[in-house]
Amino acid sequence: MPQKKRTKIKGVIPLIALLSLFLFQIVLVRAADTTTFDSILKPIQAVYDLVKYSVTIVAGLIMLFAGITYITSGSEPGKREKAKNMVMYVLIGLAVIWAAPFLVKLVLGS
């Protein structure tokens, strides 16, 4: 498989994973009544919160690394661009993971 195709596939896999988690939440909401839904949602919400806060800590470390890379890049535009991209992707990832519950509530209208 050519390198370009592998890169495209690697970029699509996280998107598919996030979409499937989003759809899983919607299915749970539609399928259960309130008491059953609350009992199902409690452990899922605990896992989601753990992942969300863990990812936020890792994102902070990556942002720190990107800042150090940017500062130490000197006159190397490749390093500077890499650091900028890291910051952009971290911010997009954080926005997605923190906005997911709000999007679910918006779609379901609850």
Image (cartoon, helix red, strand yellow):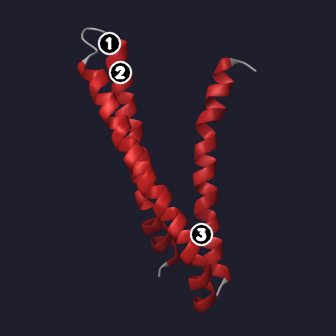
Task: Residue 90: name its quadrant.
Answer: top left
Q: Earlier in the sequence, mark 3 or mark 2?
A: 3
Q: Nearer the viewer, residue 32 or 58?
A: 58
Amino acid bearing label 3: Gln
Tell me if residue 67 comes above or below residue 45 in the rendering.
above
Comes first in the chain, label 1 or label 3: 3
Residue found at the far top of this picture: 75
x and y percent of residue 105 in the render? 47, 74
Q: CA distance from mark 1 to mark 3?
A: 42 Å
* SS at mark 3 in the image: helix
- Residue 102 appears at what percent x and percent y? 42, 68
Classify the position of the N terminus by image quarter: top right
**Where is mark 1, residue-wise?**
77
Q: Position of residue 88 (x, y in %)?
A: 37, 36
Q: Is residue 58 above or below residue 41?
A: above
Q: Residue 79: percent from the left, percent from the top? A: 35, 16
Q: Secondary structure at mark 1?
A: helix
Task: Report, in whole angstroms, how far the alpha carbon at label 1 lies from the one at label 2.
Answer: 6 Å
**70 to 59, vertically: above or below:** above
Residue to which mark 2 is pinned: 81
Q: Which amino acid lies under the numbered mark 2 shown in the image of this protein?
A: Glu
Residue at image point 62% right, 79% down: 40
What's under tag 1, amino acid-wise? Pro
The reply to whether the C-beta atoms of the residues labelled 1 and 2 are less than 8 Å apart is yes
Residue 16 left/right relative to 59 = right
